[in-house]
Image (cartoon, rainbow, N blue to C red):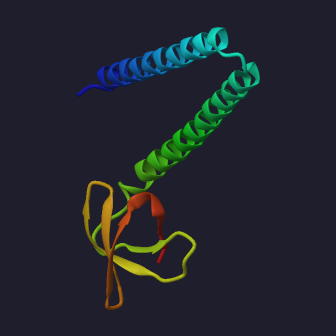
Amino acid sequence: MSTNFRDKIERERERKIELARLADFGQKYLRLMEEWNKNEDRKMVIKRFIDGITAETNKRKELAKQNKRDNFAEKKVARLKPLLKIGSKVKILNSTEIGIVESMKDEKVNITFGILKMTVNMENLELVKD
């Protein structure tokens, strides 16, 4: 699959997600309008409106953080993957134990630390220079 085609699919997927999000937002807005017109206690409606906007804002912040983490992980894997080989010395981020790569499949790496065997996602690894 070409990069342009993959990018086009990703843009289309993002557009559909955004449209669904806008439709959901519109439905919530309409429900609030109906409540505003029916309800005597408008303070409750205002509170729900503010709560809704706060939740939406927090959701967007969390999504932005997750996207940033995903992009970072993707770039790290792209840099590390060509360098990793069976027998490479690695360590898990923020640790001092050095392990040996036993096998790899996609972004999962099987590592041996002495008698301990682990499977670790590639973005959590660091190559140890000899």
Q: How many marks?
A: 0
Give the image quarter of residue 116: bottom left
Where residue 112 sits: x, y (%)?
32, 81
- For residue 87, above or below residue 41: below
- For residue 37, above or below residue 5: above
32 vs 70, left or right, is right
Query: In which quadrant of the rendered image does the N terminus lie?
Result: top left
Residue reaching furthest to the bottom: 115
- For residue 62, above or below residue 123: above
82 or 26, which lies in front?
26
- Residue drawn at 62 percent across, 11 percent down: 38
- For residue 37, above or below residue 76: above
Give the image quarter of residue 110: bottom left
102 vs 48, left or right, is left
Where residue 49 sits: x, y (%)?
67, 24
Where residue 115 sits: x, y (%)?
31, 91
- Residue drawn at 35 percent across, 63 percent down: 84
- Residue drawn at 73 percent across, 22 percent down: 46
- Residue drawn at 63 percent across, 29 percent down: 52
Residue reaching furthest to the top: 37
Residue reaching furthest to the front: 40
63 vs 117, left or right, is right
Where residue 66 sits: x, y (%)?
53, 43
61 or 58, which lies in front?
58
